[in-house]
Image (spheres, grey):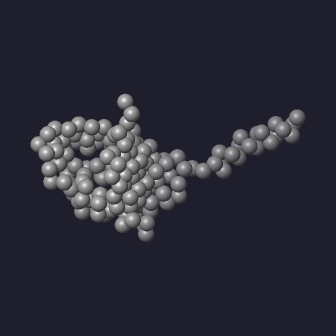
Amino acid sequence: MYRMQYILLLVCVIWPCLAPAANQPGPEAATVRALELKWAEAYKLRQFDVLSSFLDDDCVSTFEDGNVFGKLGVISYIAKPSVHVEIADISDLKIRMHGLTAVVTGAYHEQGVTDGKRYDYHDRFTDVWMKVRGNWKLIASHYSIPAQ
């Protein structure tokens, strides 16, 4: 009986030390959070050089309409001259760290004008960032419209 209690006590004391710290906030998670916010701002301000610097050369992005693009396709897709973004807000950010990889989920709200017509939509996203040669790069993203 005492042996079982001793083992249980050891497990309760040692387990938290051995469990991965994947979901604990830290400086790398804070850096990724800041990059997500900068991404949304650069998108709204049409700073394509900034957006391009965040994307890994081998990135893949899936948009709400099902289109899948690499780096050049992403920049071309979001650079449509007929689109004027007024609001590009992200919220409900959750960052899960896995070594040099961060998986970010969140909600996105965009409002603006496209082809002379107002639009307002909400979606969910998953971004995967990886530290490549000392810099965080967006290697994959997926956007989807939430089920009603």
Query: Which quarter of the picture shows residue 117?
Result: top left
Q: Which one is nearer the viewer's eye here, 138 or 119? A: 119
In this image, 87 relative to 145: left or right? left
Q: How many marks?
A: 0
Q: Is residue 39 visible?
A: yes
Question: What residue is rendered at 84% in x and 38% in y?
Answer: 4
Q: In which quarter of the image is the N terminus?
A: top right
Q: Which one is nearer the viewer's eye here, 65 or 53? A: 65
Question: What residue is rendered at 26% in x and 44% in y?
Answer: 88
132 lies above or below 16: below
In this view, the residue farthest toward the bottom is: 133
Question: What residue is rendered at 39% in x and 65% in y?
Answer: 58
Q: Can residue 50 be seen in this view?
A: no
In this image, 46 relative to 95: left or right? left
Q: Which one is nearer the viewer's eye here, 133 or 46? A: 46
Question: What residue is rendered at 27% in x and 37% in y?
Answer: 121
In this view, the residue farthest toward the left is: 116
Residue 140 is situated, as x and y percent measured from the top left of the image, at: 41, 56
Query: Which quarter of the picture shows residue 77?
Result: bottom left
Q: In which quarter of the image is the C terminus?
A: top left
Residue 123 is situated, as x and y percent measured from the top left of the image, at: 34, 40
Q: Which one is nearer the viewer's eye here, 131 or 30? A: 131
Residue 69 is situated, as x and y percent measured from the top left of the image, at: 33, 58
In this view, the residue farthest toward the top is: 148
Residue 118 is situated, as x and y percent measured from the top left of the image, at: 16, 38
109 lies above or below 47: above
